[in-house]
Amino acid sequence: MRPQTEAELAAIITEASGPLCITGGGTRGLAVAGATVSAQGLSGIRLYEPGALTMVAGAGTPLAEIEAELAKQGQRLAFEPMDHRGLLGTGGEPTIGGVVAANISGPRRIQVGACRDFLLGVRFVDGNGQIIKNGGRVMKNVTGYDLVKLMSGSFGTLGVLTELSFKVMPKPQTQADLLIEGLTEETAVAAMSAALGSPFDVSGAAHIALGQDGAPVTMIRVEGFEASVAYRADRLRDLLAKFGAFQIETDPQRTAARWIAVRDVEVFHGRQGDVWRISCKPSDGPQLADRLGADGILYDWGGGLICSLVPDGTDVRARLGAFGGHASVIRASAETKARLGVFQPEPAGVAALSSGLKAKFDPRGILNPGLMG
Amino acid sequence: MEMPAPNSEILSRKHELLTRLRAVLPDDAVIGDEAETRVYECDALTAYKCPPLAAILPSSTQEVSDALKICHDMGVPVVPRGAGTSLAGGALPTADSVILGIARMNDVLEVDYDNRFIRVQAGRTNLSVSDAVAEEDFFYAPDPSSQLACAIGGNIAMNSGGAHCLKYGVTTNNLMGVTMVTMDGSIVEIGGAHLDAGGLDLLGLVCGSEGQLGVVTEATLRILRKPEGARPVLVAYDSNEVAGQCVSDIIQAGVLPVAIEFMDRPCIRATEAFAKAGYPDCEALLIIEVEGSESEIADQLALIRQIAERHNPIEFREAMDADQAARIWLGRKSAFGAMGQINDYMCLDGTIPVSQLPYVLRRIGEMSKEYGLGVGNVFHAGDGNMHPLILYDANKPGDLEKCEAFGADILKLCVEVGGCLTGEHGVGIEKRDLMVNQFDPVDLECQMAVKDVFDPAWLLNPAKVFPLASSHGRRMAAE
């Protein structure tokens, strides 16, 4: 089913008698059993005010359309959402609704915040078929409860997003990478922490530790006006000298491509095995990665995000044991996902609150049932 | 402002309540004496006062849990209170409620520079969080103007902002985790030193829920390294339209100032009379602050100057040294005090799309004439967060009511042009009954359903946020 209006969507949900599989572009491999309801018909940019850094768009609007429109004004989505197609081997067009529903953020999350931090307002249809709005289109808004954050990352289990308003950011004039090969994982994380704890406004800190040809590589990014980027890159190189001799690269194509590769975890494209994503305290990263026995390890977010490639069916959570953070499946067989669950099980108190919310928003349990436990 | 009638059955059980609370809290942490509970009768919205039945001052998460279990068991409403600086009446008691003050919980629990976070007890003041990491040149970014006094727990409850959130975001963008006690005494940990939620974003939901979902006792906060330097400029224009256009052009040019503050003529005049900061006498004044190294600051200011001069400013004043920088900020920082010298005032914080600024200022000016009450505007222009200060005389019968009606009209206007009722102060009791202007019943019902999950008996801060008529059924069911 592919409703063209919010009202049609509301009618579909009201009349539904069984599970519904809610999808946007279907690029992220999250389909559940049930009648498919696609949000792609709810498409189009409804408002764009570059001087106010705000855009409002239908949830089904292709991300590419949004990015093209923003680029015309020298702006962009600052949270750098990952494109899952290469990693998962899926087709289709990512939509803004899908990005928000999965709270997808890329390398710049460490500097500017996650997708949810840029979301200003939502409209959605809940499990009862009611059309609900929350938030708005202004930067600061504490009017009532923040369901905007709640809806972001709820993977369609609380409601089907129909319209989103979000904050956009100016595209910087230029960027530079600081690069070094051959650091151990501990040293790389220490170097990234030093960079992120500096006043030099680092917008990316990643380390490809294992799984690529050649030596491990550590990369640190700064963005902004040209003179400022040059200044900060130099200062960072001095600051990081105790970890090794970093090279500065400013070629626009190569620097851009490098961070797309990190964002989309290109190092695991086309390779056999399951892919897991672990969010942790950065300094815990190397020790956690060590427990995995992985075939590939990529650190992003200064070490606070580990993408790991492990043999098919590996129970990554069992290998990690107890830790501060969470591990989720990005790529695995349906059997593995069903056996282990896509998301980290929550402590009893939190789980009770989460299931209580689901029961209120979707009392019949028909929206993406089972996806979030 | 109407508040629900106190439950006489609870009032009659005061002795039993105090006895039970004293069994789990130190003697000096349970206050029942009427002279002493009066301290908690209001917050910074001083127009409304009501002493609580009792006040408690727990020192730990466990004590909060023990006390809440007793209140839950006895069906007694609880009003959490940070430092009592709410401008929206967020901590206003009812006569049958227990004030739960978190002021004694003010320890730093953990500082981790490598991982860039600090964990504190929620009663710690905002500024003292930054102070705790100042030795390593770090800071906690959200900076509400009450930061000297206000508590982190209150900041989380109201999702507080500040002048510098244009670059650094508000509380919710800088909050990584909380330890929270729900009304039944359950202790839950949400988030931590890692980023983003593993399941539903309960952290985002709790932040800004005005103490209605749980009592936050500990918080993990993101800390940042201080920039190398910062410098403000002052730009004066002879029209609000032009100043508004200048703000929009600066933002669009890709410069990201940490703050863009806007003051209108009535506010500039009041401020000048009071603080003598040496501001030009003009229609609209902008204070724009940028950060970075000396050369980065110079480059950004050059670009800002270029944009500002396209709009023919009356004056463009750069701070040449720390003293001049302080003078530029002096007037802005004295604005509230200056307006207070003229008269009593009510401060609103409706937020509007930046593009609507000139229209809204014009309408506020017209309404000011209609109501016969003066109003000065000082606000965070970069994000459209207005702060109209309406002057009234508290001793003049009817003036407060007139002022409230004027305020309500301004907030309705904010909603009309695509904005919202409150950008950083919260709804509290002040804007509770205006919520119907921004939300349909079904929207409010959905929010109230969230409270049903966390606090099914509606005992935590029950008469706030939602119009009394909307929450009536739920509050009555609880009794």
Image: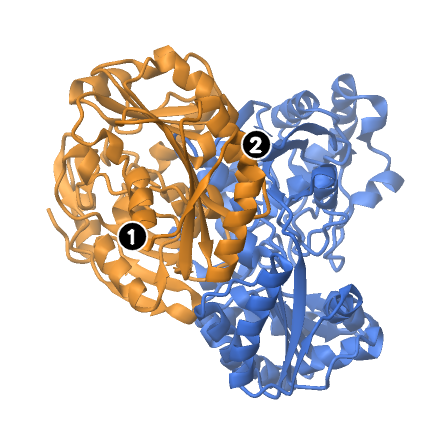
The answer, for residue B196, to whether it is visible in the render is yes
Pick the quarter of the image with the C terminus of chain B. top right
Task: Look at the image and give the colour of chain A.
Answer: orange
Asked if B162 appears above or below A341 in the picture, the reply is below
Q: Label 1: how many residues lie within 10 Å, few (<14), some (14-19) or many (20+)? A: few
Which label lies toward us, 1 or 2?
2
**Do marks 1 and 2 share a subunit?**
yes
Give how far across and how far down residue A180 sits, in percent.
42, 35
Which chain does tag 1 point to? A
Asked if A157 appears above or below A324 in the picture, the reply is below
Horizontally, residue B104 falls left or right of residue A178, namely right
- Quadrant in the rendering for residue B366: bottom right
Task: Look at the image and give the colour of chain B.
Answer: blue
Q: Are marks 1 and 2 in contact (CB under 8 Å)?
A: no
Q: Between disc 1 and disc 2, whose residue precedes?
A: 2
Asked if B124 appears above or below B68 in the picture, the reply is below
Give how far across and how far down residue A225 sits, in percent.
47, 61
Say which element carries label 1: helix
Residue under pointer 1: A253
State the CA–CA distance, disc 1 to disc 2: 29 Å
Say which element carries label 2: helix
The amino acid beneath tag 2 is: Lys
Q: Residue at x 18, y 33 (%)?
A: A88
Which chain does tag 2 point to? A
